[in-house]
Image: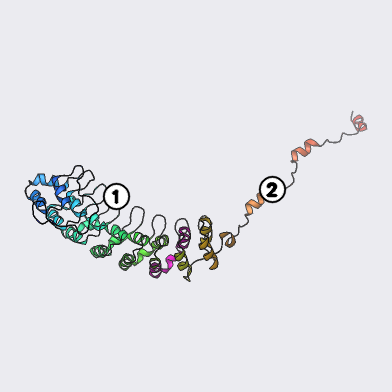
């Protein structure tokens, strides 16, 4: 493909679904970057005064995007390679309104070439986070970009331990979305993450139980068998969650594990059987019963409350008149009349 001036124009690494129309407040540099016109970009970069160029590089359009962000989003690696030479770390890390900077949006799209270029210029960009404290690693893990995940893990293993504002790590999100290779990579780097909980008290295994990837569930059981009975803040095990979500195969898999607690009762006094019946999953309820899971009412019959029983006893006892009422209701016998005369 050639640009309008006849010079070769780098193509996006992959087909973009976005239109090449500009946005409000786009500068000429934005427009050239959006079109992937390297020649026009170079003319602007080299033909603009230092102070004016500084303002141009950090200029954001209506969506908060810099020209570098636009080039990275569209996958124009040659354009990014030239532009990053003029960006300092602060300007390279300017975030769009979506919370992403150029590095983060490249990670989201799985663009390894652009990530390498940006990392070579400013390695610190790997620590970028969006408005909810999501790292580029987390975003790549959520999308299943295993090559990007490995690249970022090599850049800094501590990235795997950074959680979003809701407490979820990259492992939580990868597990929820069924990205087995990503989960393996994360656990290889940080094995202890298997039992890390989010603000709801849920582990990656809880996340996997919500999904539909059997291999993912198996992988996490092998990685940390104890997580199978870990409970969240509501007292739910992964079996409760799988029963509520109607995940038949995952329920069968968890029940097949010898360490599964079949008597786990959550904070609403439900076993997995109670949860399945409550949510209308009759087939799962039948499977649970076949494996010996009982209702909480059977496992924990309502215990007698001594204080309550005493109160009931007092309420049912026949009423007894008070002492004062006894004296007031009875007449004392009068002395004989003869005794009265004798005293006078």
Q: Label 2: how many residues lie within 10 Å, few (<14), some (14-19) or many (20+)? A: few
Is residue 264 in view?
no
Residue nearest the observer in this picture, 318 or 293: 293
Residue 12 is inside the magenta segment: no
Q: Which residues are magenta?
A: 217-246
Q: Nearer the viewer, residue 8 or 275?
A: 8
Image vertical order of residue 37 relative to residue 322, above or below: below
Q: Residue furthest right?
A: 338
Q: Secondary structure at mark 2?
A: helix
Disc on the earlier residue, 2 or 1: 1
- Is residue 72 at least partly visible in the picture? yes
Most common secondary structure along the magenta stretch: helix
Q: Residue at x 14, y 49 (%)?
A: 32
**Could you tell whether 271 is left or right of 102 in the image?**
right
Quick one: quadrant of the C terminus? top right
Q: Percent position (x, y) of residue 1?
A: 13, 57
Where's residue 154, x and y in %? 24, 65
Distance from the alpha carbon under mark 2 to that under mark 1: 61 Å
- The residue wearing badge 1 is 131
Q: 229 or 183: nearer the eye?
A: 183
Query: Is residue 224 within the magenta segment?
Result: yes
Seen in the image, is 23 located left or right of residue 324? Answer: left
**What residue is pinned by disc 2?**
314
């Amino acid at each position: 493909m050639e640009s309008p001036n006849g010079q070769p124009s780098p193509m996006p690494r992959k087909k973009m679904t976005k239109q090449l129309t500009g946005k409000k407040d786009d500068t000429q540099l934005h427009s050239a970057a959006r079109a992937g016109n390297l020649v026009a970009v170079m003319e602007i970069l080299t033909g603009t005064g230092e102070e004016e160029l500084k303002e141009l590089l950090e200029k954001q359009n209506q969506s908060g995007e810099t020209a570098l962000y636009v080039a990275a989003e569209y996958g124009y690696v040659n354009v990014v390679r030239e532009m990053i030479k003029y960006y300092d770390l602060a300007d390279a890390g300017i975030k769009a309104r979506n919370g992403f900077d150029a590095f983060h949006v490249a990670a989201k799209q799985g663009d390894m070439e652009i990530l390498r270029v940006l990392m070579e210029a400013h390695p610190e960009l790997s620590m970028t986070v969006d408005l909810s404290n999501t790292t580029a690693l987390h975003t790549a893990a959520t999308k299943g970009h295993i090559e990007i995940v490995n690249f970022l893990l090599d850049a800094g293993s501590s990235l795997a331990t950074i959680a979003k504002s809701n407490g979820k790590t990259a492992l939580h999100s990868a597990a929820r979305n069924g990205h087995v290779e990503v989960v393996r990579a994360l656990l290889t780097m940080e094995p202890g993450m298997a039992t890390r909980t989010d603000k709801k008290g849920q582990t990656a295994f809880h996340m996997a139980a919500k999904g539909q990837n059997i291999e993912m569930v198996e992988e996490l059981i092998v990685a940390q068998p104890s997580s199978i009975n870990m409970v969240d803040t509501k007292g739910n095990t992964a079996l409760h969650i799988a029963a509520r979500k109607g995940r038949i195969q995952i329920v069968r898999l968890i029940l097949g594990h010898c360490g599964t607690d079949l008597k786990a009762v959550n904070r609403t006094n439900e076993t997995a059987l109670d949860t399945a019946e409550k949510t209308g999953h009759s087939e799962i309820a039948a499977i649970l019963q076949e494996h010996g899971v009982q209702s909480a009412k059977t496992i924990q019959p309502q215990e007698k409350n001594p204080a309550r029983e005493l109160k009931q006893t007092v309420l049912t006892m026949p009423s007894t008149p008070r002492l004062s009422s006894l004296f007031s209701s009875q007449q004392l016998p009068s002395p004989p009349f003869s005794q009265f005369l004798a005293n006078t």
